[in-house]
Amino acid sequence: MTRIARAGLWALYAGALAASPAMAQDAPAYDGAATAWVLTATALVLFMTLPGLALFYAGLVKSKNVLSVMMHCVAIACLASVLWLLGAYSLAFSGTAPLVGDFAKFALAGVERHTASGQIPENLFFMFQMTFAVITPALIVGAFVERIRFSAVMIFSALWLFLVYAPVCHWVWGGGWLMERKVMDYAGGLVVHATAGISALVLAWRLGTRPGFPRELSPPHNPGLTMMGAGMLWVGWYGFNGGSALTAGGDAAAAILATHLSAATAGLVWAVIEKIRFKRSSMVGLVTGVVAGLATVTPASGFVGPVGGIILGAAGSLICYNAVELVKHRLKIDDSLDVFAVHGVGGVLGTLAVAVLASPMFGGVGYAEGVDMAGQALTQAIGVGATLAWSAIVTLVLAVALEKTVGLRAPEEVIEEGLDLADHGERAYGA
């Protein structure tokens, strides 16, 4: 069949579809620019997990555990995507109850091809939010690398998505009680970073430490992988924060600008701290600072100006750096890749600081009608306290339940051999 003939058949097929009753219904007038931008942002946010986060974490562990970390990220992405359809999305974004949604949109019931959510198709809104549901439990992977059972990872991630992520998402973005209080969380300081950060700390505490912690651990096996992963996270964060505007315009551009400046500032500050303390600046330290800046600016990104982004980056880097020292050397908790210190502390800091930096005097957008700086600060503090408490309690219950059933920590001989071969029968590198 010639190219012209094939084109003619396709034209006839398309015409038949357009004439069919289902396609003849008036479709909502989506905003084309908004739809195109959120489609792009959705791809960028998934890119943060696969391969960004997987590479970032893989470079930081021993070579015998590289594939296990990547496997955790990919498997969680698959699992969370399916569960988002089978109830988690509905619990987050349907219903009017203050604490959690309902199952009215289980499997996207009632959502047709042309159903709108604001200026974009609801299928697209579902997908964009799904990528957040993918990366949030994947962030927790950094706390338990090199010593957890794969079965425990999968069971924990599934239950955590329903019991922690979906309810908090509903509180903040889905019409729940914190949304009613006008909490400011532009892209996930509470929903993503606070939930994942505190859950990581609790899980790391229950798992126990790796052999040699904290003084005799091997250095990151491949800082180059970590740098590549961090670069992908940085680029993907444009979609994470900028896409949360759900429109293409000034709000998205302002969020991306604040995000970039916060990341850049934080990387420089972390490098300077290392130079002062150790007489050299490391690649791992620099990119860890970048990620700390990205996490800190996330809840504030669409509410603050460029100066606010720089302030958040500098403060986030300084405070997260000291949080790493506190967790590992004071609390003696082996949060292996600093999930709590970087994401948890950064997300909480940004969530609290936005109450000040959103003020027009700092170039911010101001507050909701009837809300002043003091009232906003109280709401932000309430949101932080509730999110941390709920996430920590549920994670502790899940961890204890897993310890008593399938087991949480891998056997010591498996830890010694490495999870790549023991759990997956593969090596990242040649024998």
Image: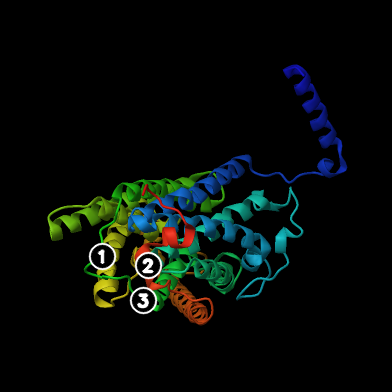
Q: Is residue 155 left or right of residue 318?
A: right
Instruction: Find the distance from the CA under tag 3 to the CA under tag 1.
Output: 14 Å
Q: Earlier in the sequence, mark 2 or mark 3?
A: 3
Kindly report which numbered mark, 2 or 3, lies closer to the viewer in this rendering.
2
- Residue at point 26%, 61% (across, down): 218
Q: Is residue 279 left or right of residue 230?
A: left
Instruction: Find the distance from the CA under tag 1 to the CA under tag 2.
Output: 13 Å
Q: Are marks 3 and 1 in contact (CB under 8 Å)?
A: no
Q: Are marks 1 and 2 in contact (CB under 8 Å)?
A: no
- Residue at point 49%, 45% (across, down): 250
What residue did someone put label 3 on? 208
Q: Is residue 117 above or below residue 391?
A: above
Where on the picture, by quarter, is residue 100? bottom right
Give the percent coordinates (x, y) of residue 376: 44, 70
What residue did someone put label 2 on? 415
- Residue at point 80%, 44% (across, down): 26
Give the percent coordinates (x, y) of residue 284: 27, 53
Residue 268 appears in the rendering:
yes
Q: Amino acid at mark 3?
A: Gly
Q: Nearer the viewer, residue 120 or 63?
A: 63
Q: Nearer the viewer, residue 138 or 34?
A: 138
Query: Crowding at label 1, few (<14), some or many (≥20) Cα neighbours within 10 Å?
Result: few
How many numbered marks does the figure carry?
Answer: 3
What residue did someone put label 1 on? 217
